[in-house]
Amino acid sequence: MREYKALASRGTACTVLSMGNQVYSHAGYLIIKVSNSGFVVLNKRKDFKNGHTHIRSFKTAKYLIDLASRKTLPHHLSPYLLVSLMRITEDDMFKRKVEQLLFAKNDRRQKPVRRQTA
């Protein structure tokens, strides 16, 4: 509860913090359980608006925190998780790498598939 008050005093907290319960904390990141809708991953070093993301699974939320803190970028992440990773990370260079991967994935999806004619 003290962390919530500290975040609120800096103007970074939102009603999400008062609605949920903190269930995990690691390396400046919080996971907050929000009713039945899932979890909010929050970077305490960023303002709430630009430093949080909504995730349905606790395991996935912990995985995102691990990736952000280690600055590891697996290529199998969905576009949604890549955007989530960009939102919670504070390292600009890592954010650019994630953005490039997201652009490459979106580019691959938009290219028309050539069909071979017999």
Image (spheres, rainbow, N blue to C red):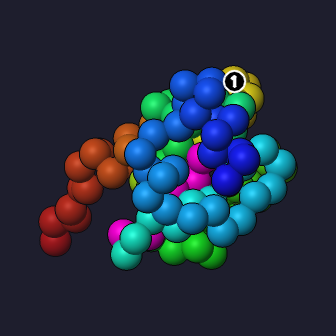
**Picture coordinates of residue 105, whole percent (x, y):** 45, 48
Of residue 116 and residue 99, the one placed in the foreground of this image is: 99
What residue is shown with label 1?
Answer: 92
Disc 1 crowd rating (10 Å Cα; few below 14, some 14-19, many 20+) is few
Magenta region includes residue 40: yes
Q: Amino acid at mark 1?
A: Asp
- Please tell me which residue is depicted at 21% across the width and 62% down the height of the picture: 115
| Residue 50 higher or lower than 74, as above or below | above
- Please tell me which residue is depicted at 48% across the width and 52% down the height of the picture: 18
Magenta region includes residue 112: no
| Residue 28 higher or lower than 95, as above or below | below
- Please tell me which residue is depicted at 83% across the width and 49% down the height of the picture: 27
Of residue 18 and residue 74, the one placed in the foreground of this image is: 18
Q: Is residue 68 left or right of residue 27?
A: left
Q: Is residue 69 left or right of residue 13?
A: right
Which quadrant of the structure image shows residue 89? top right
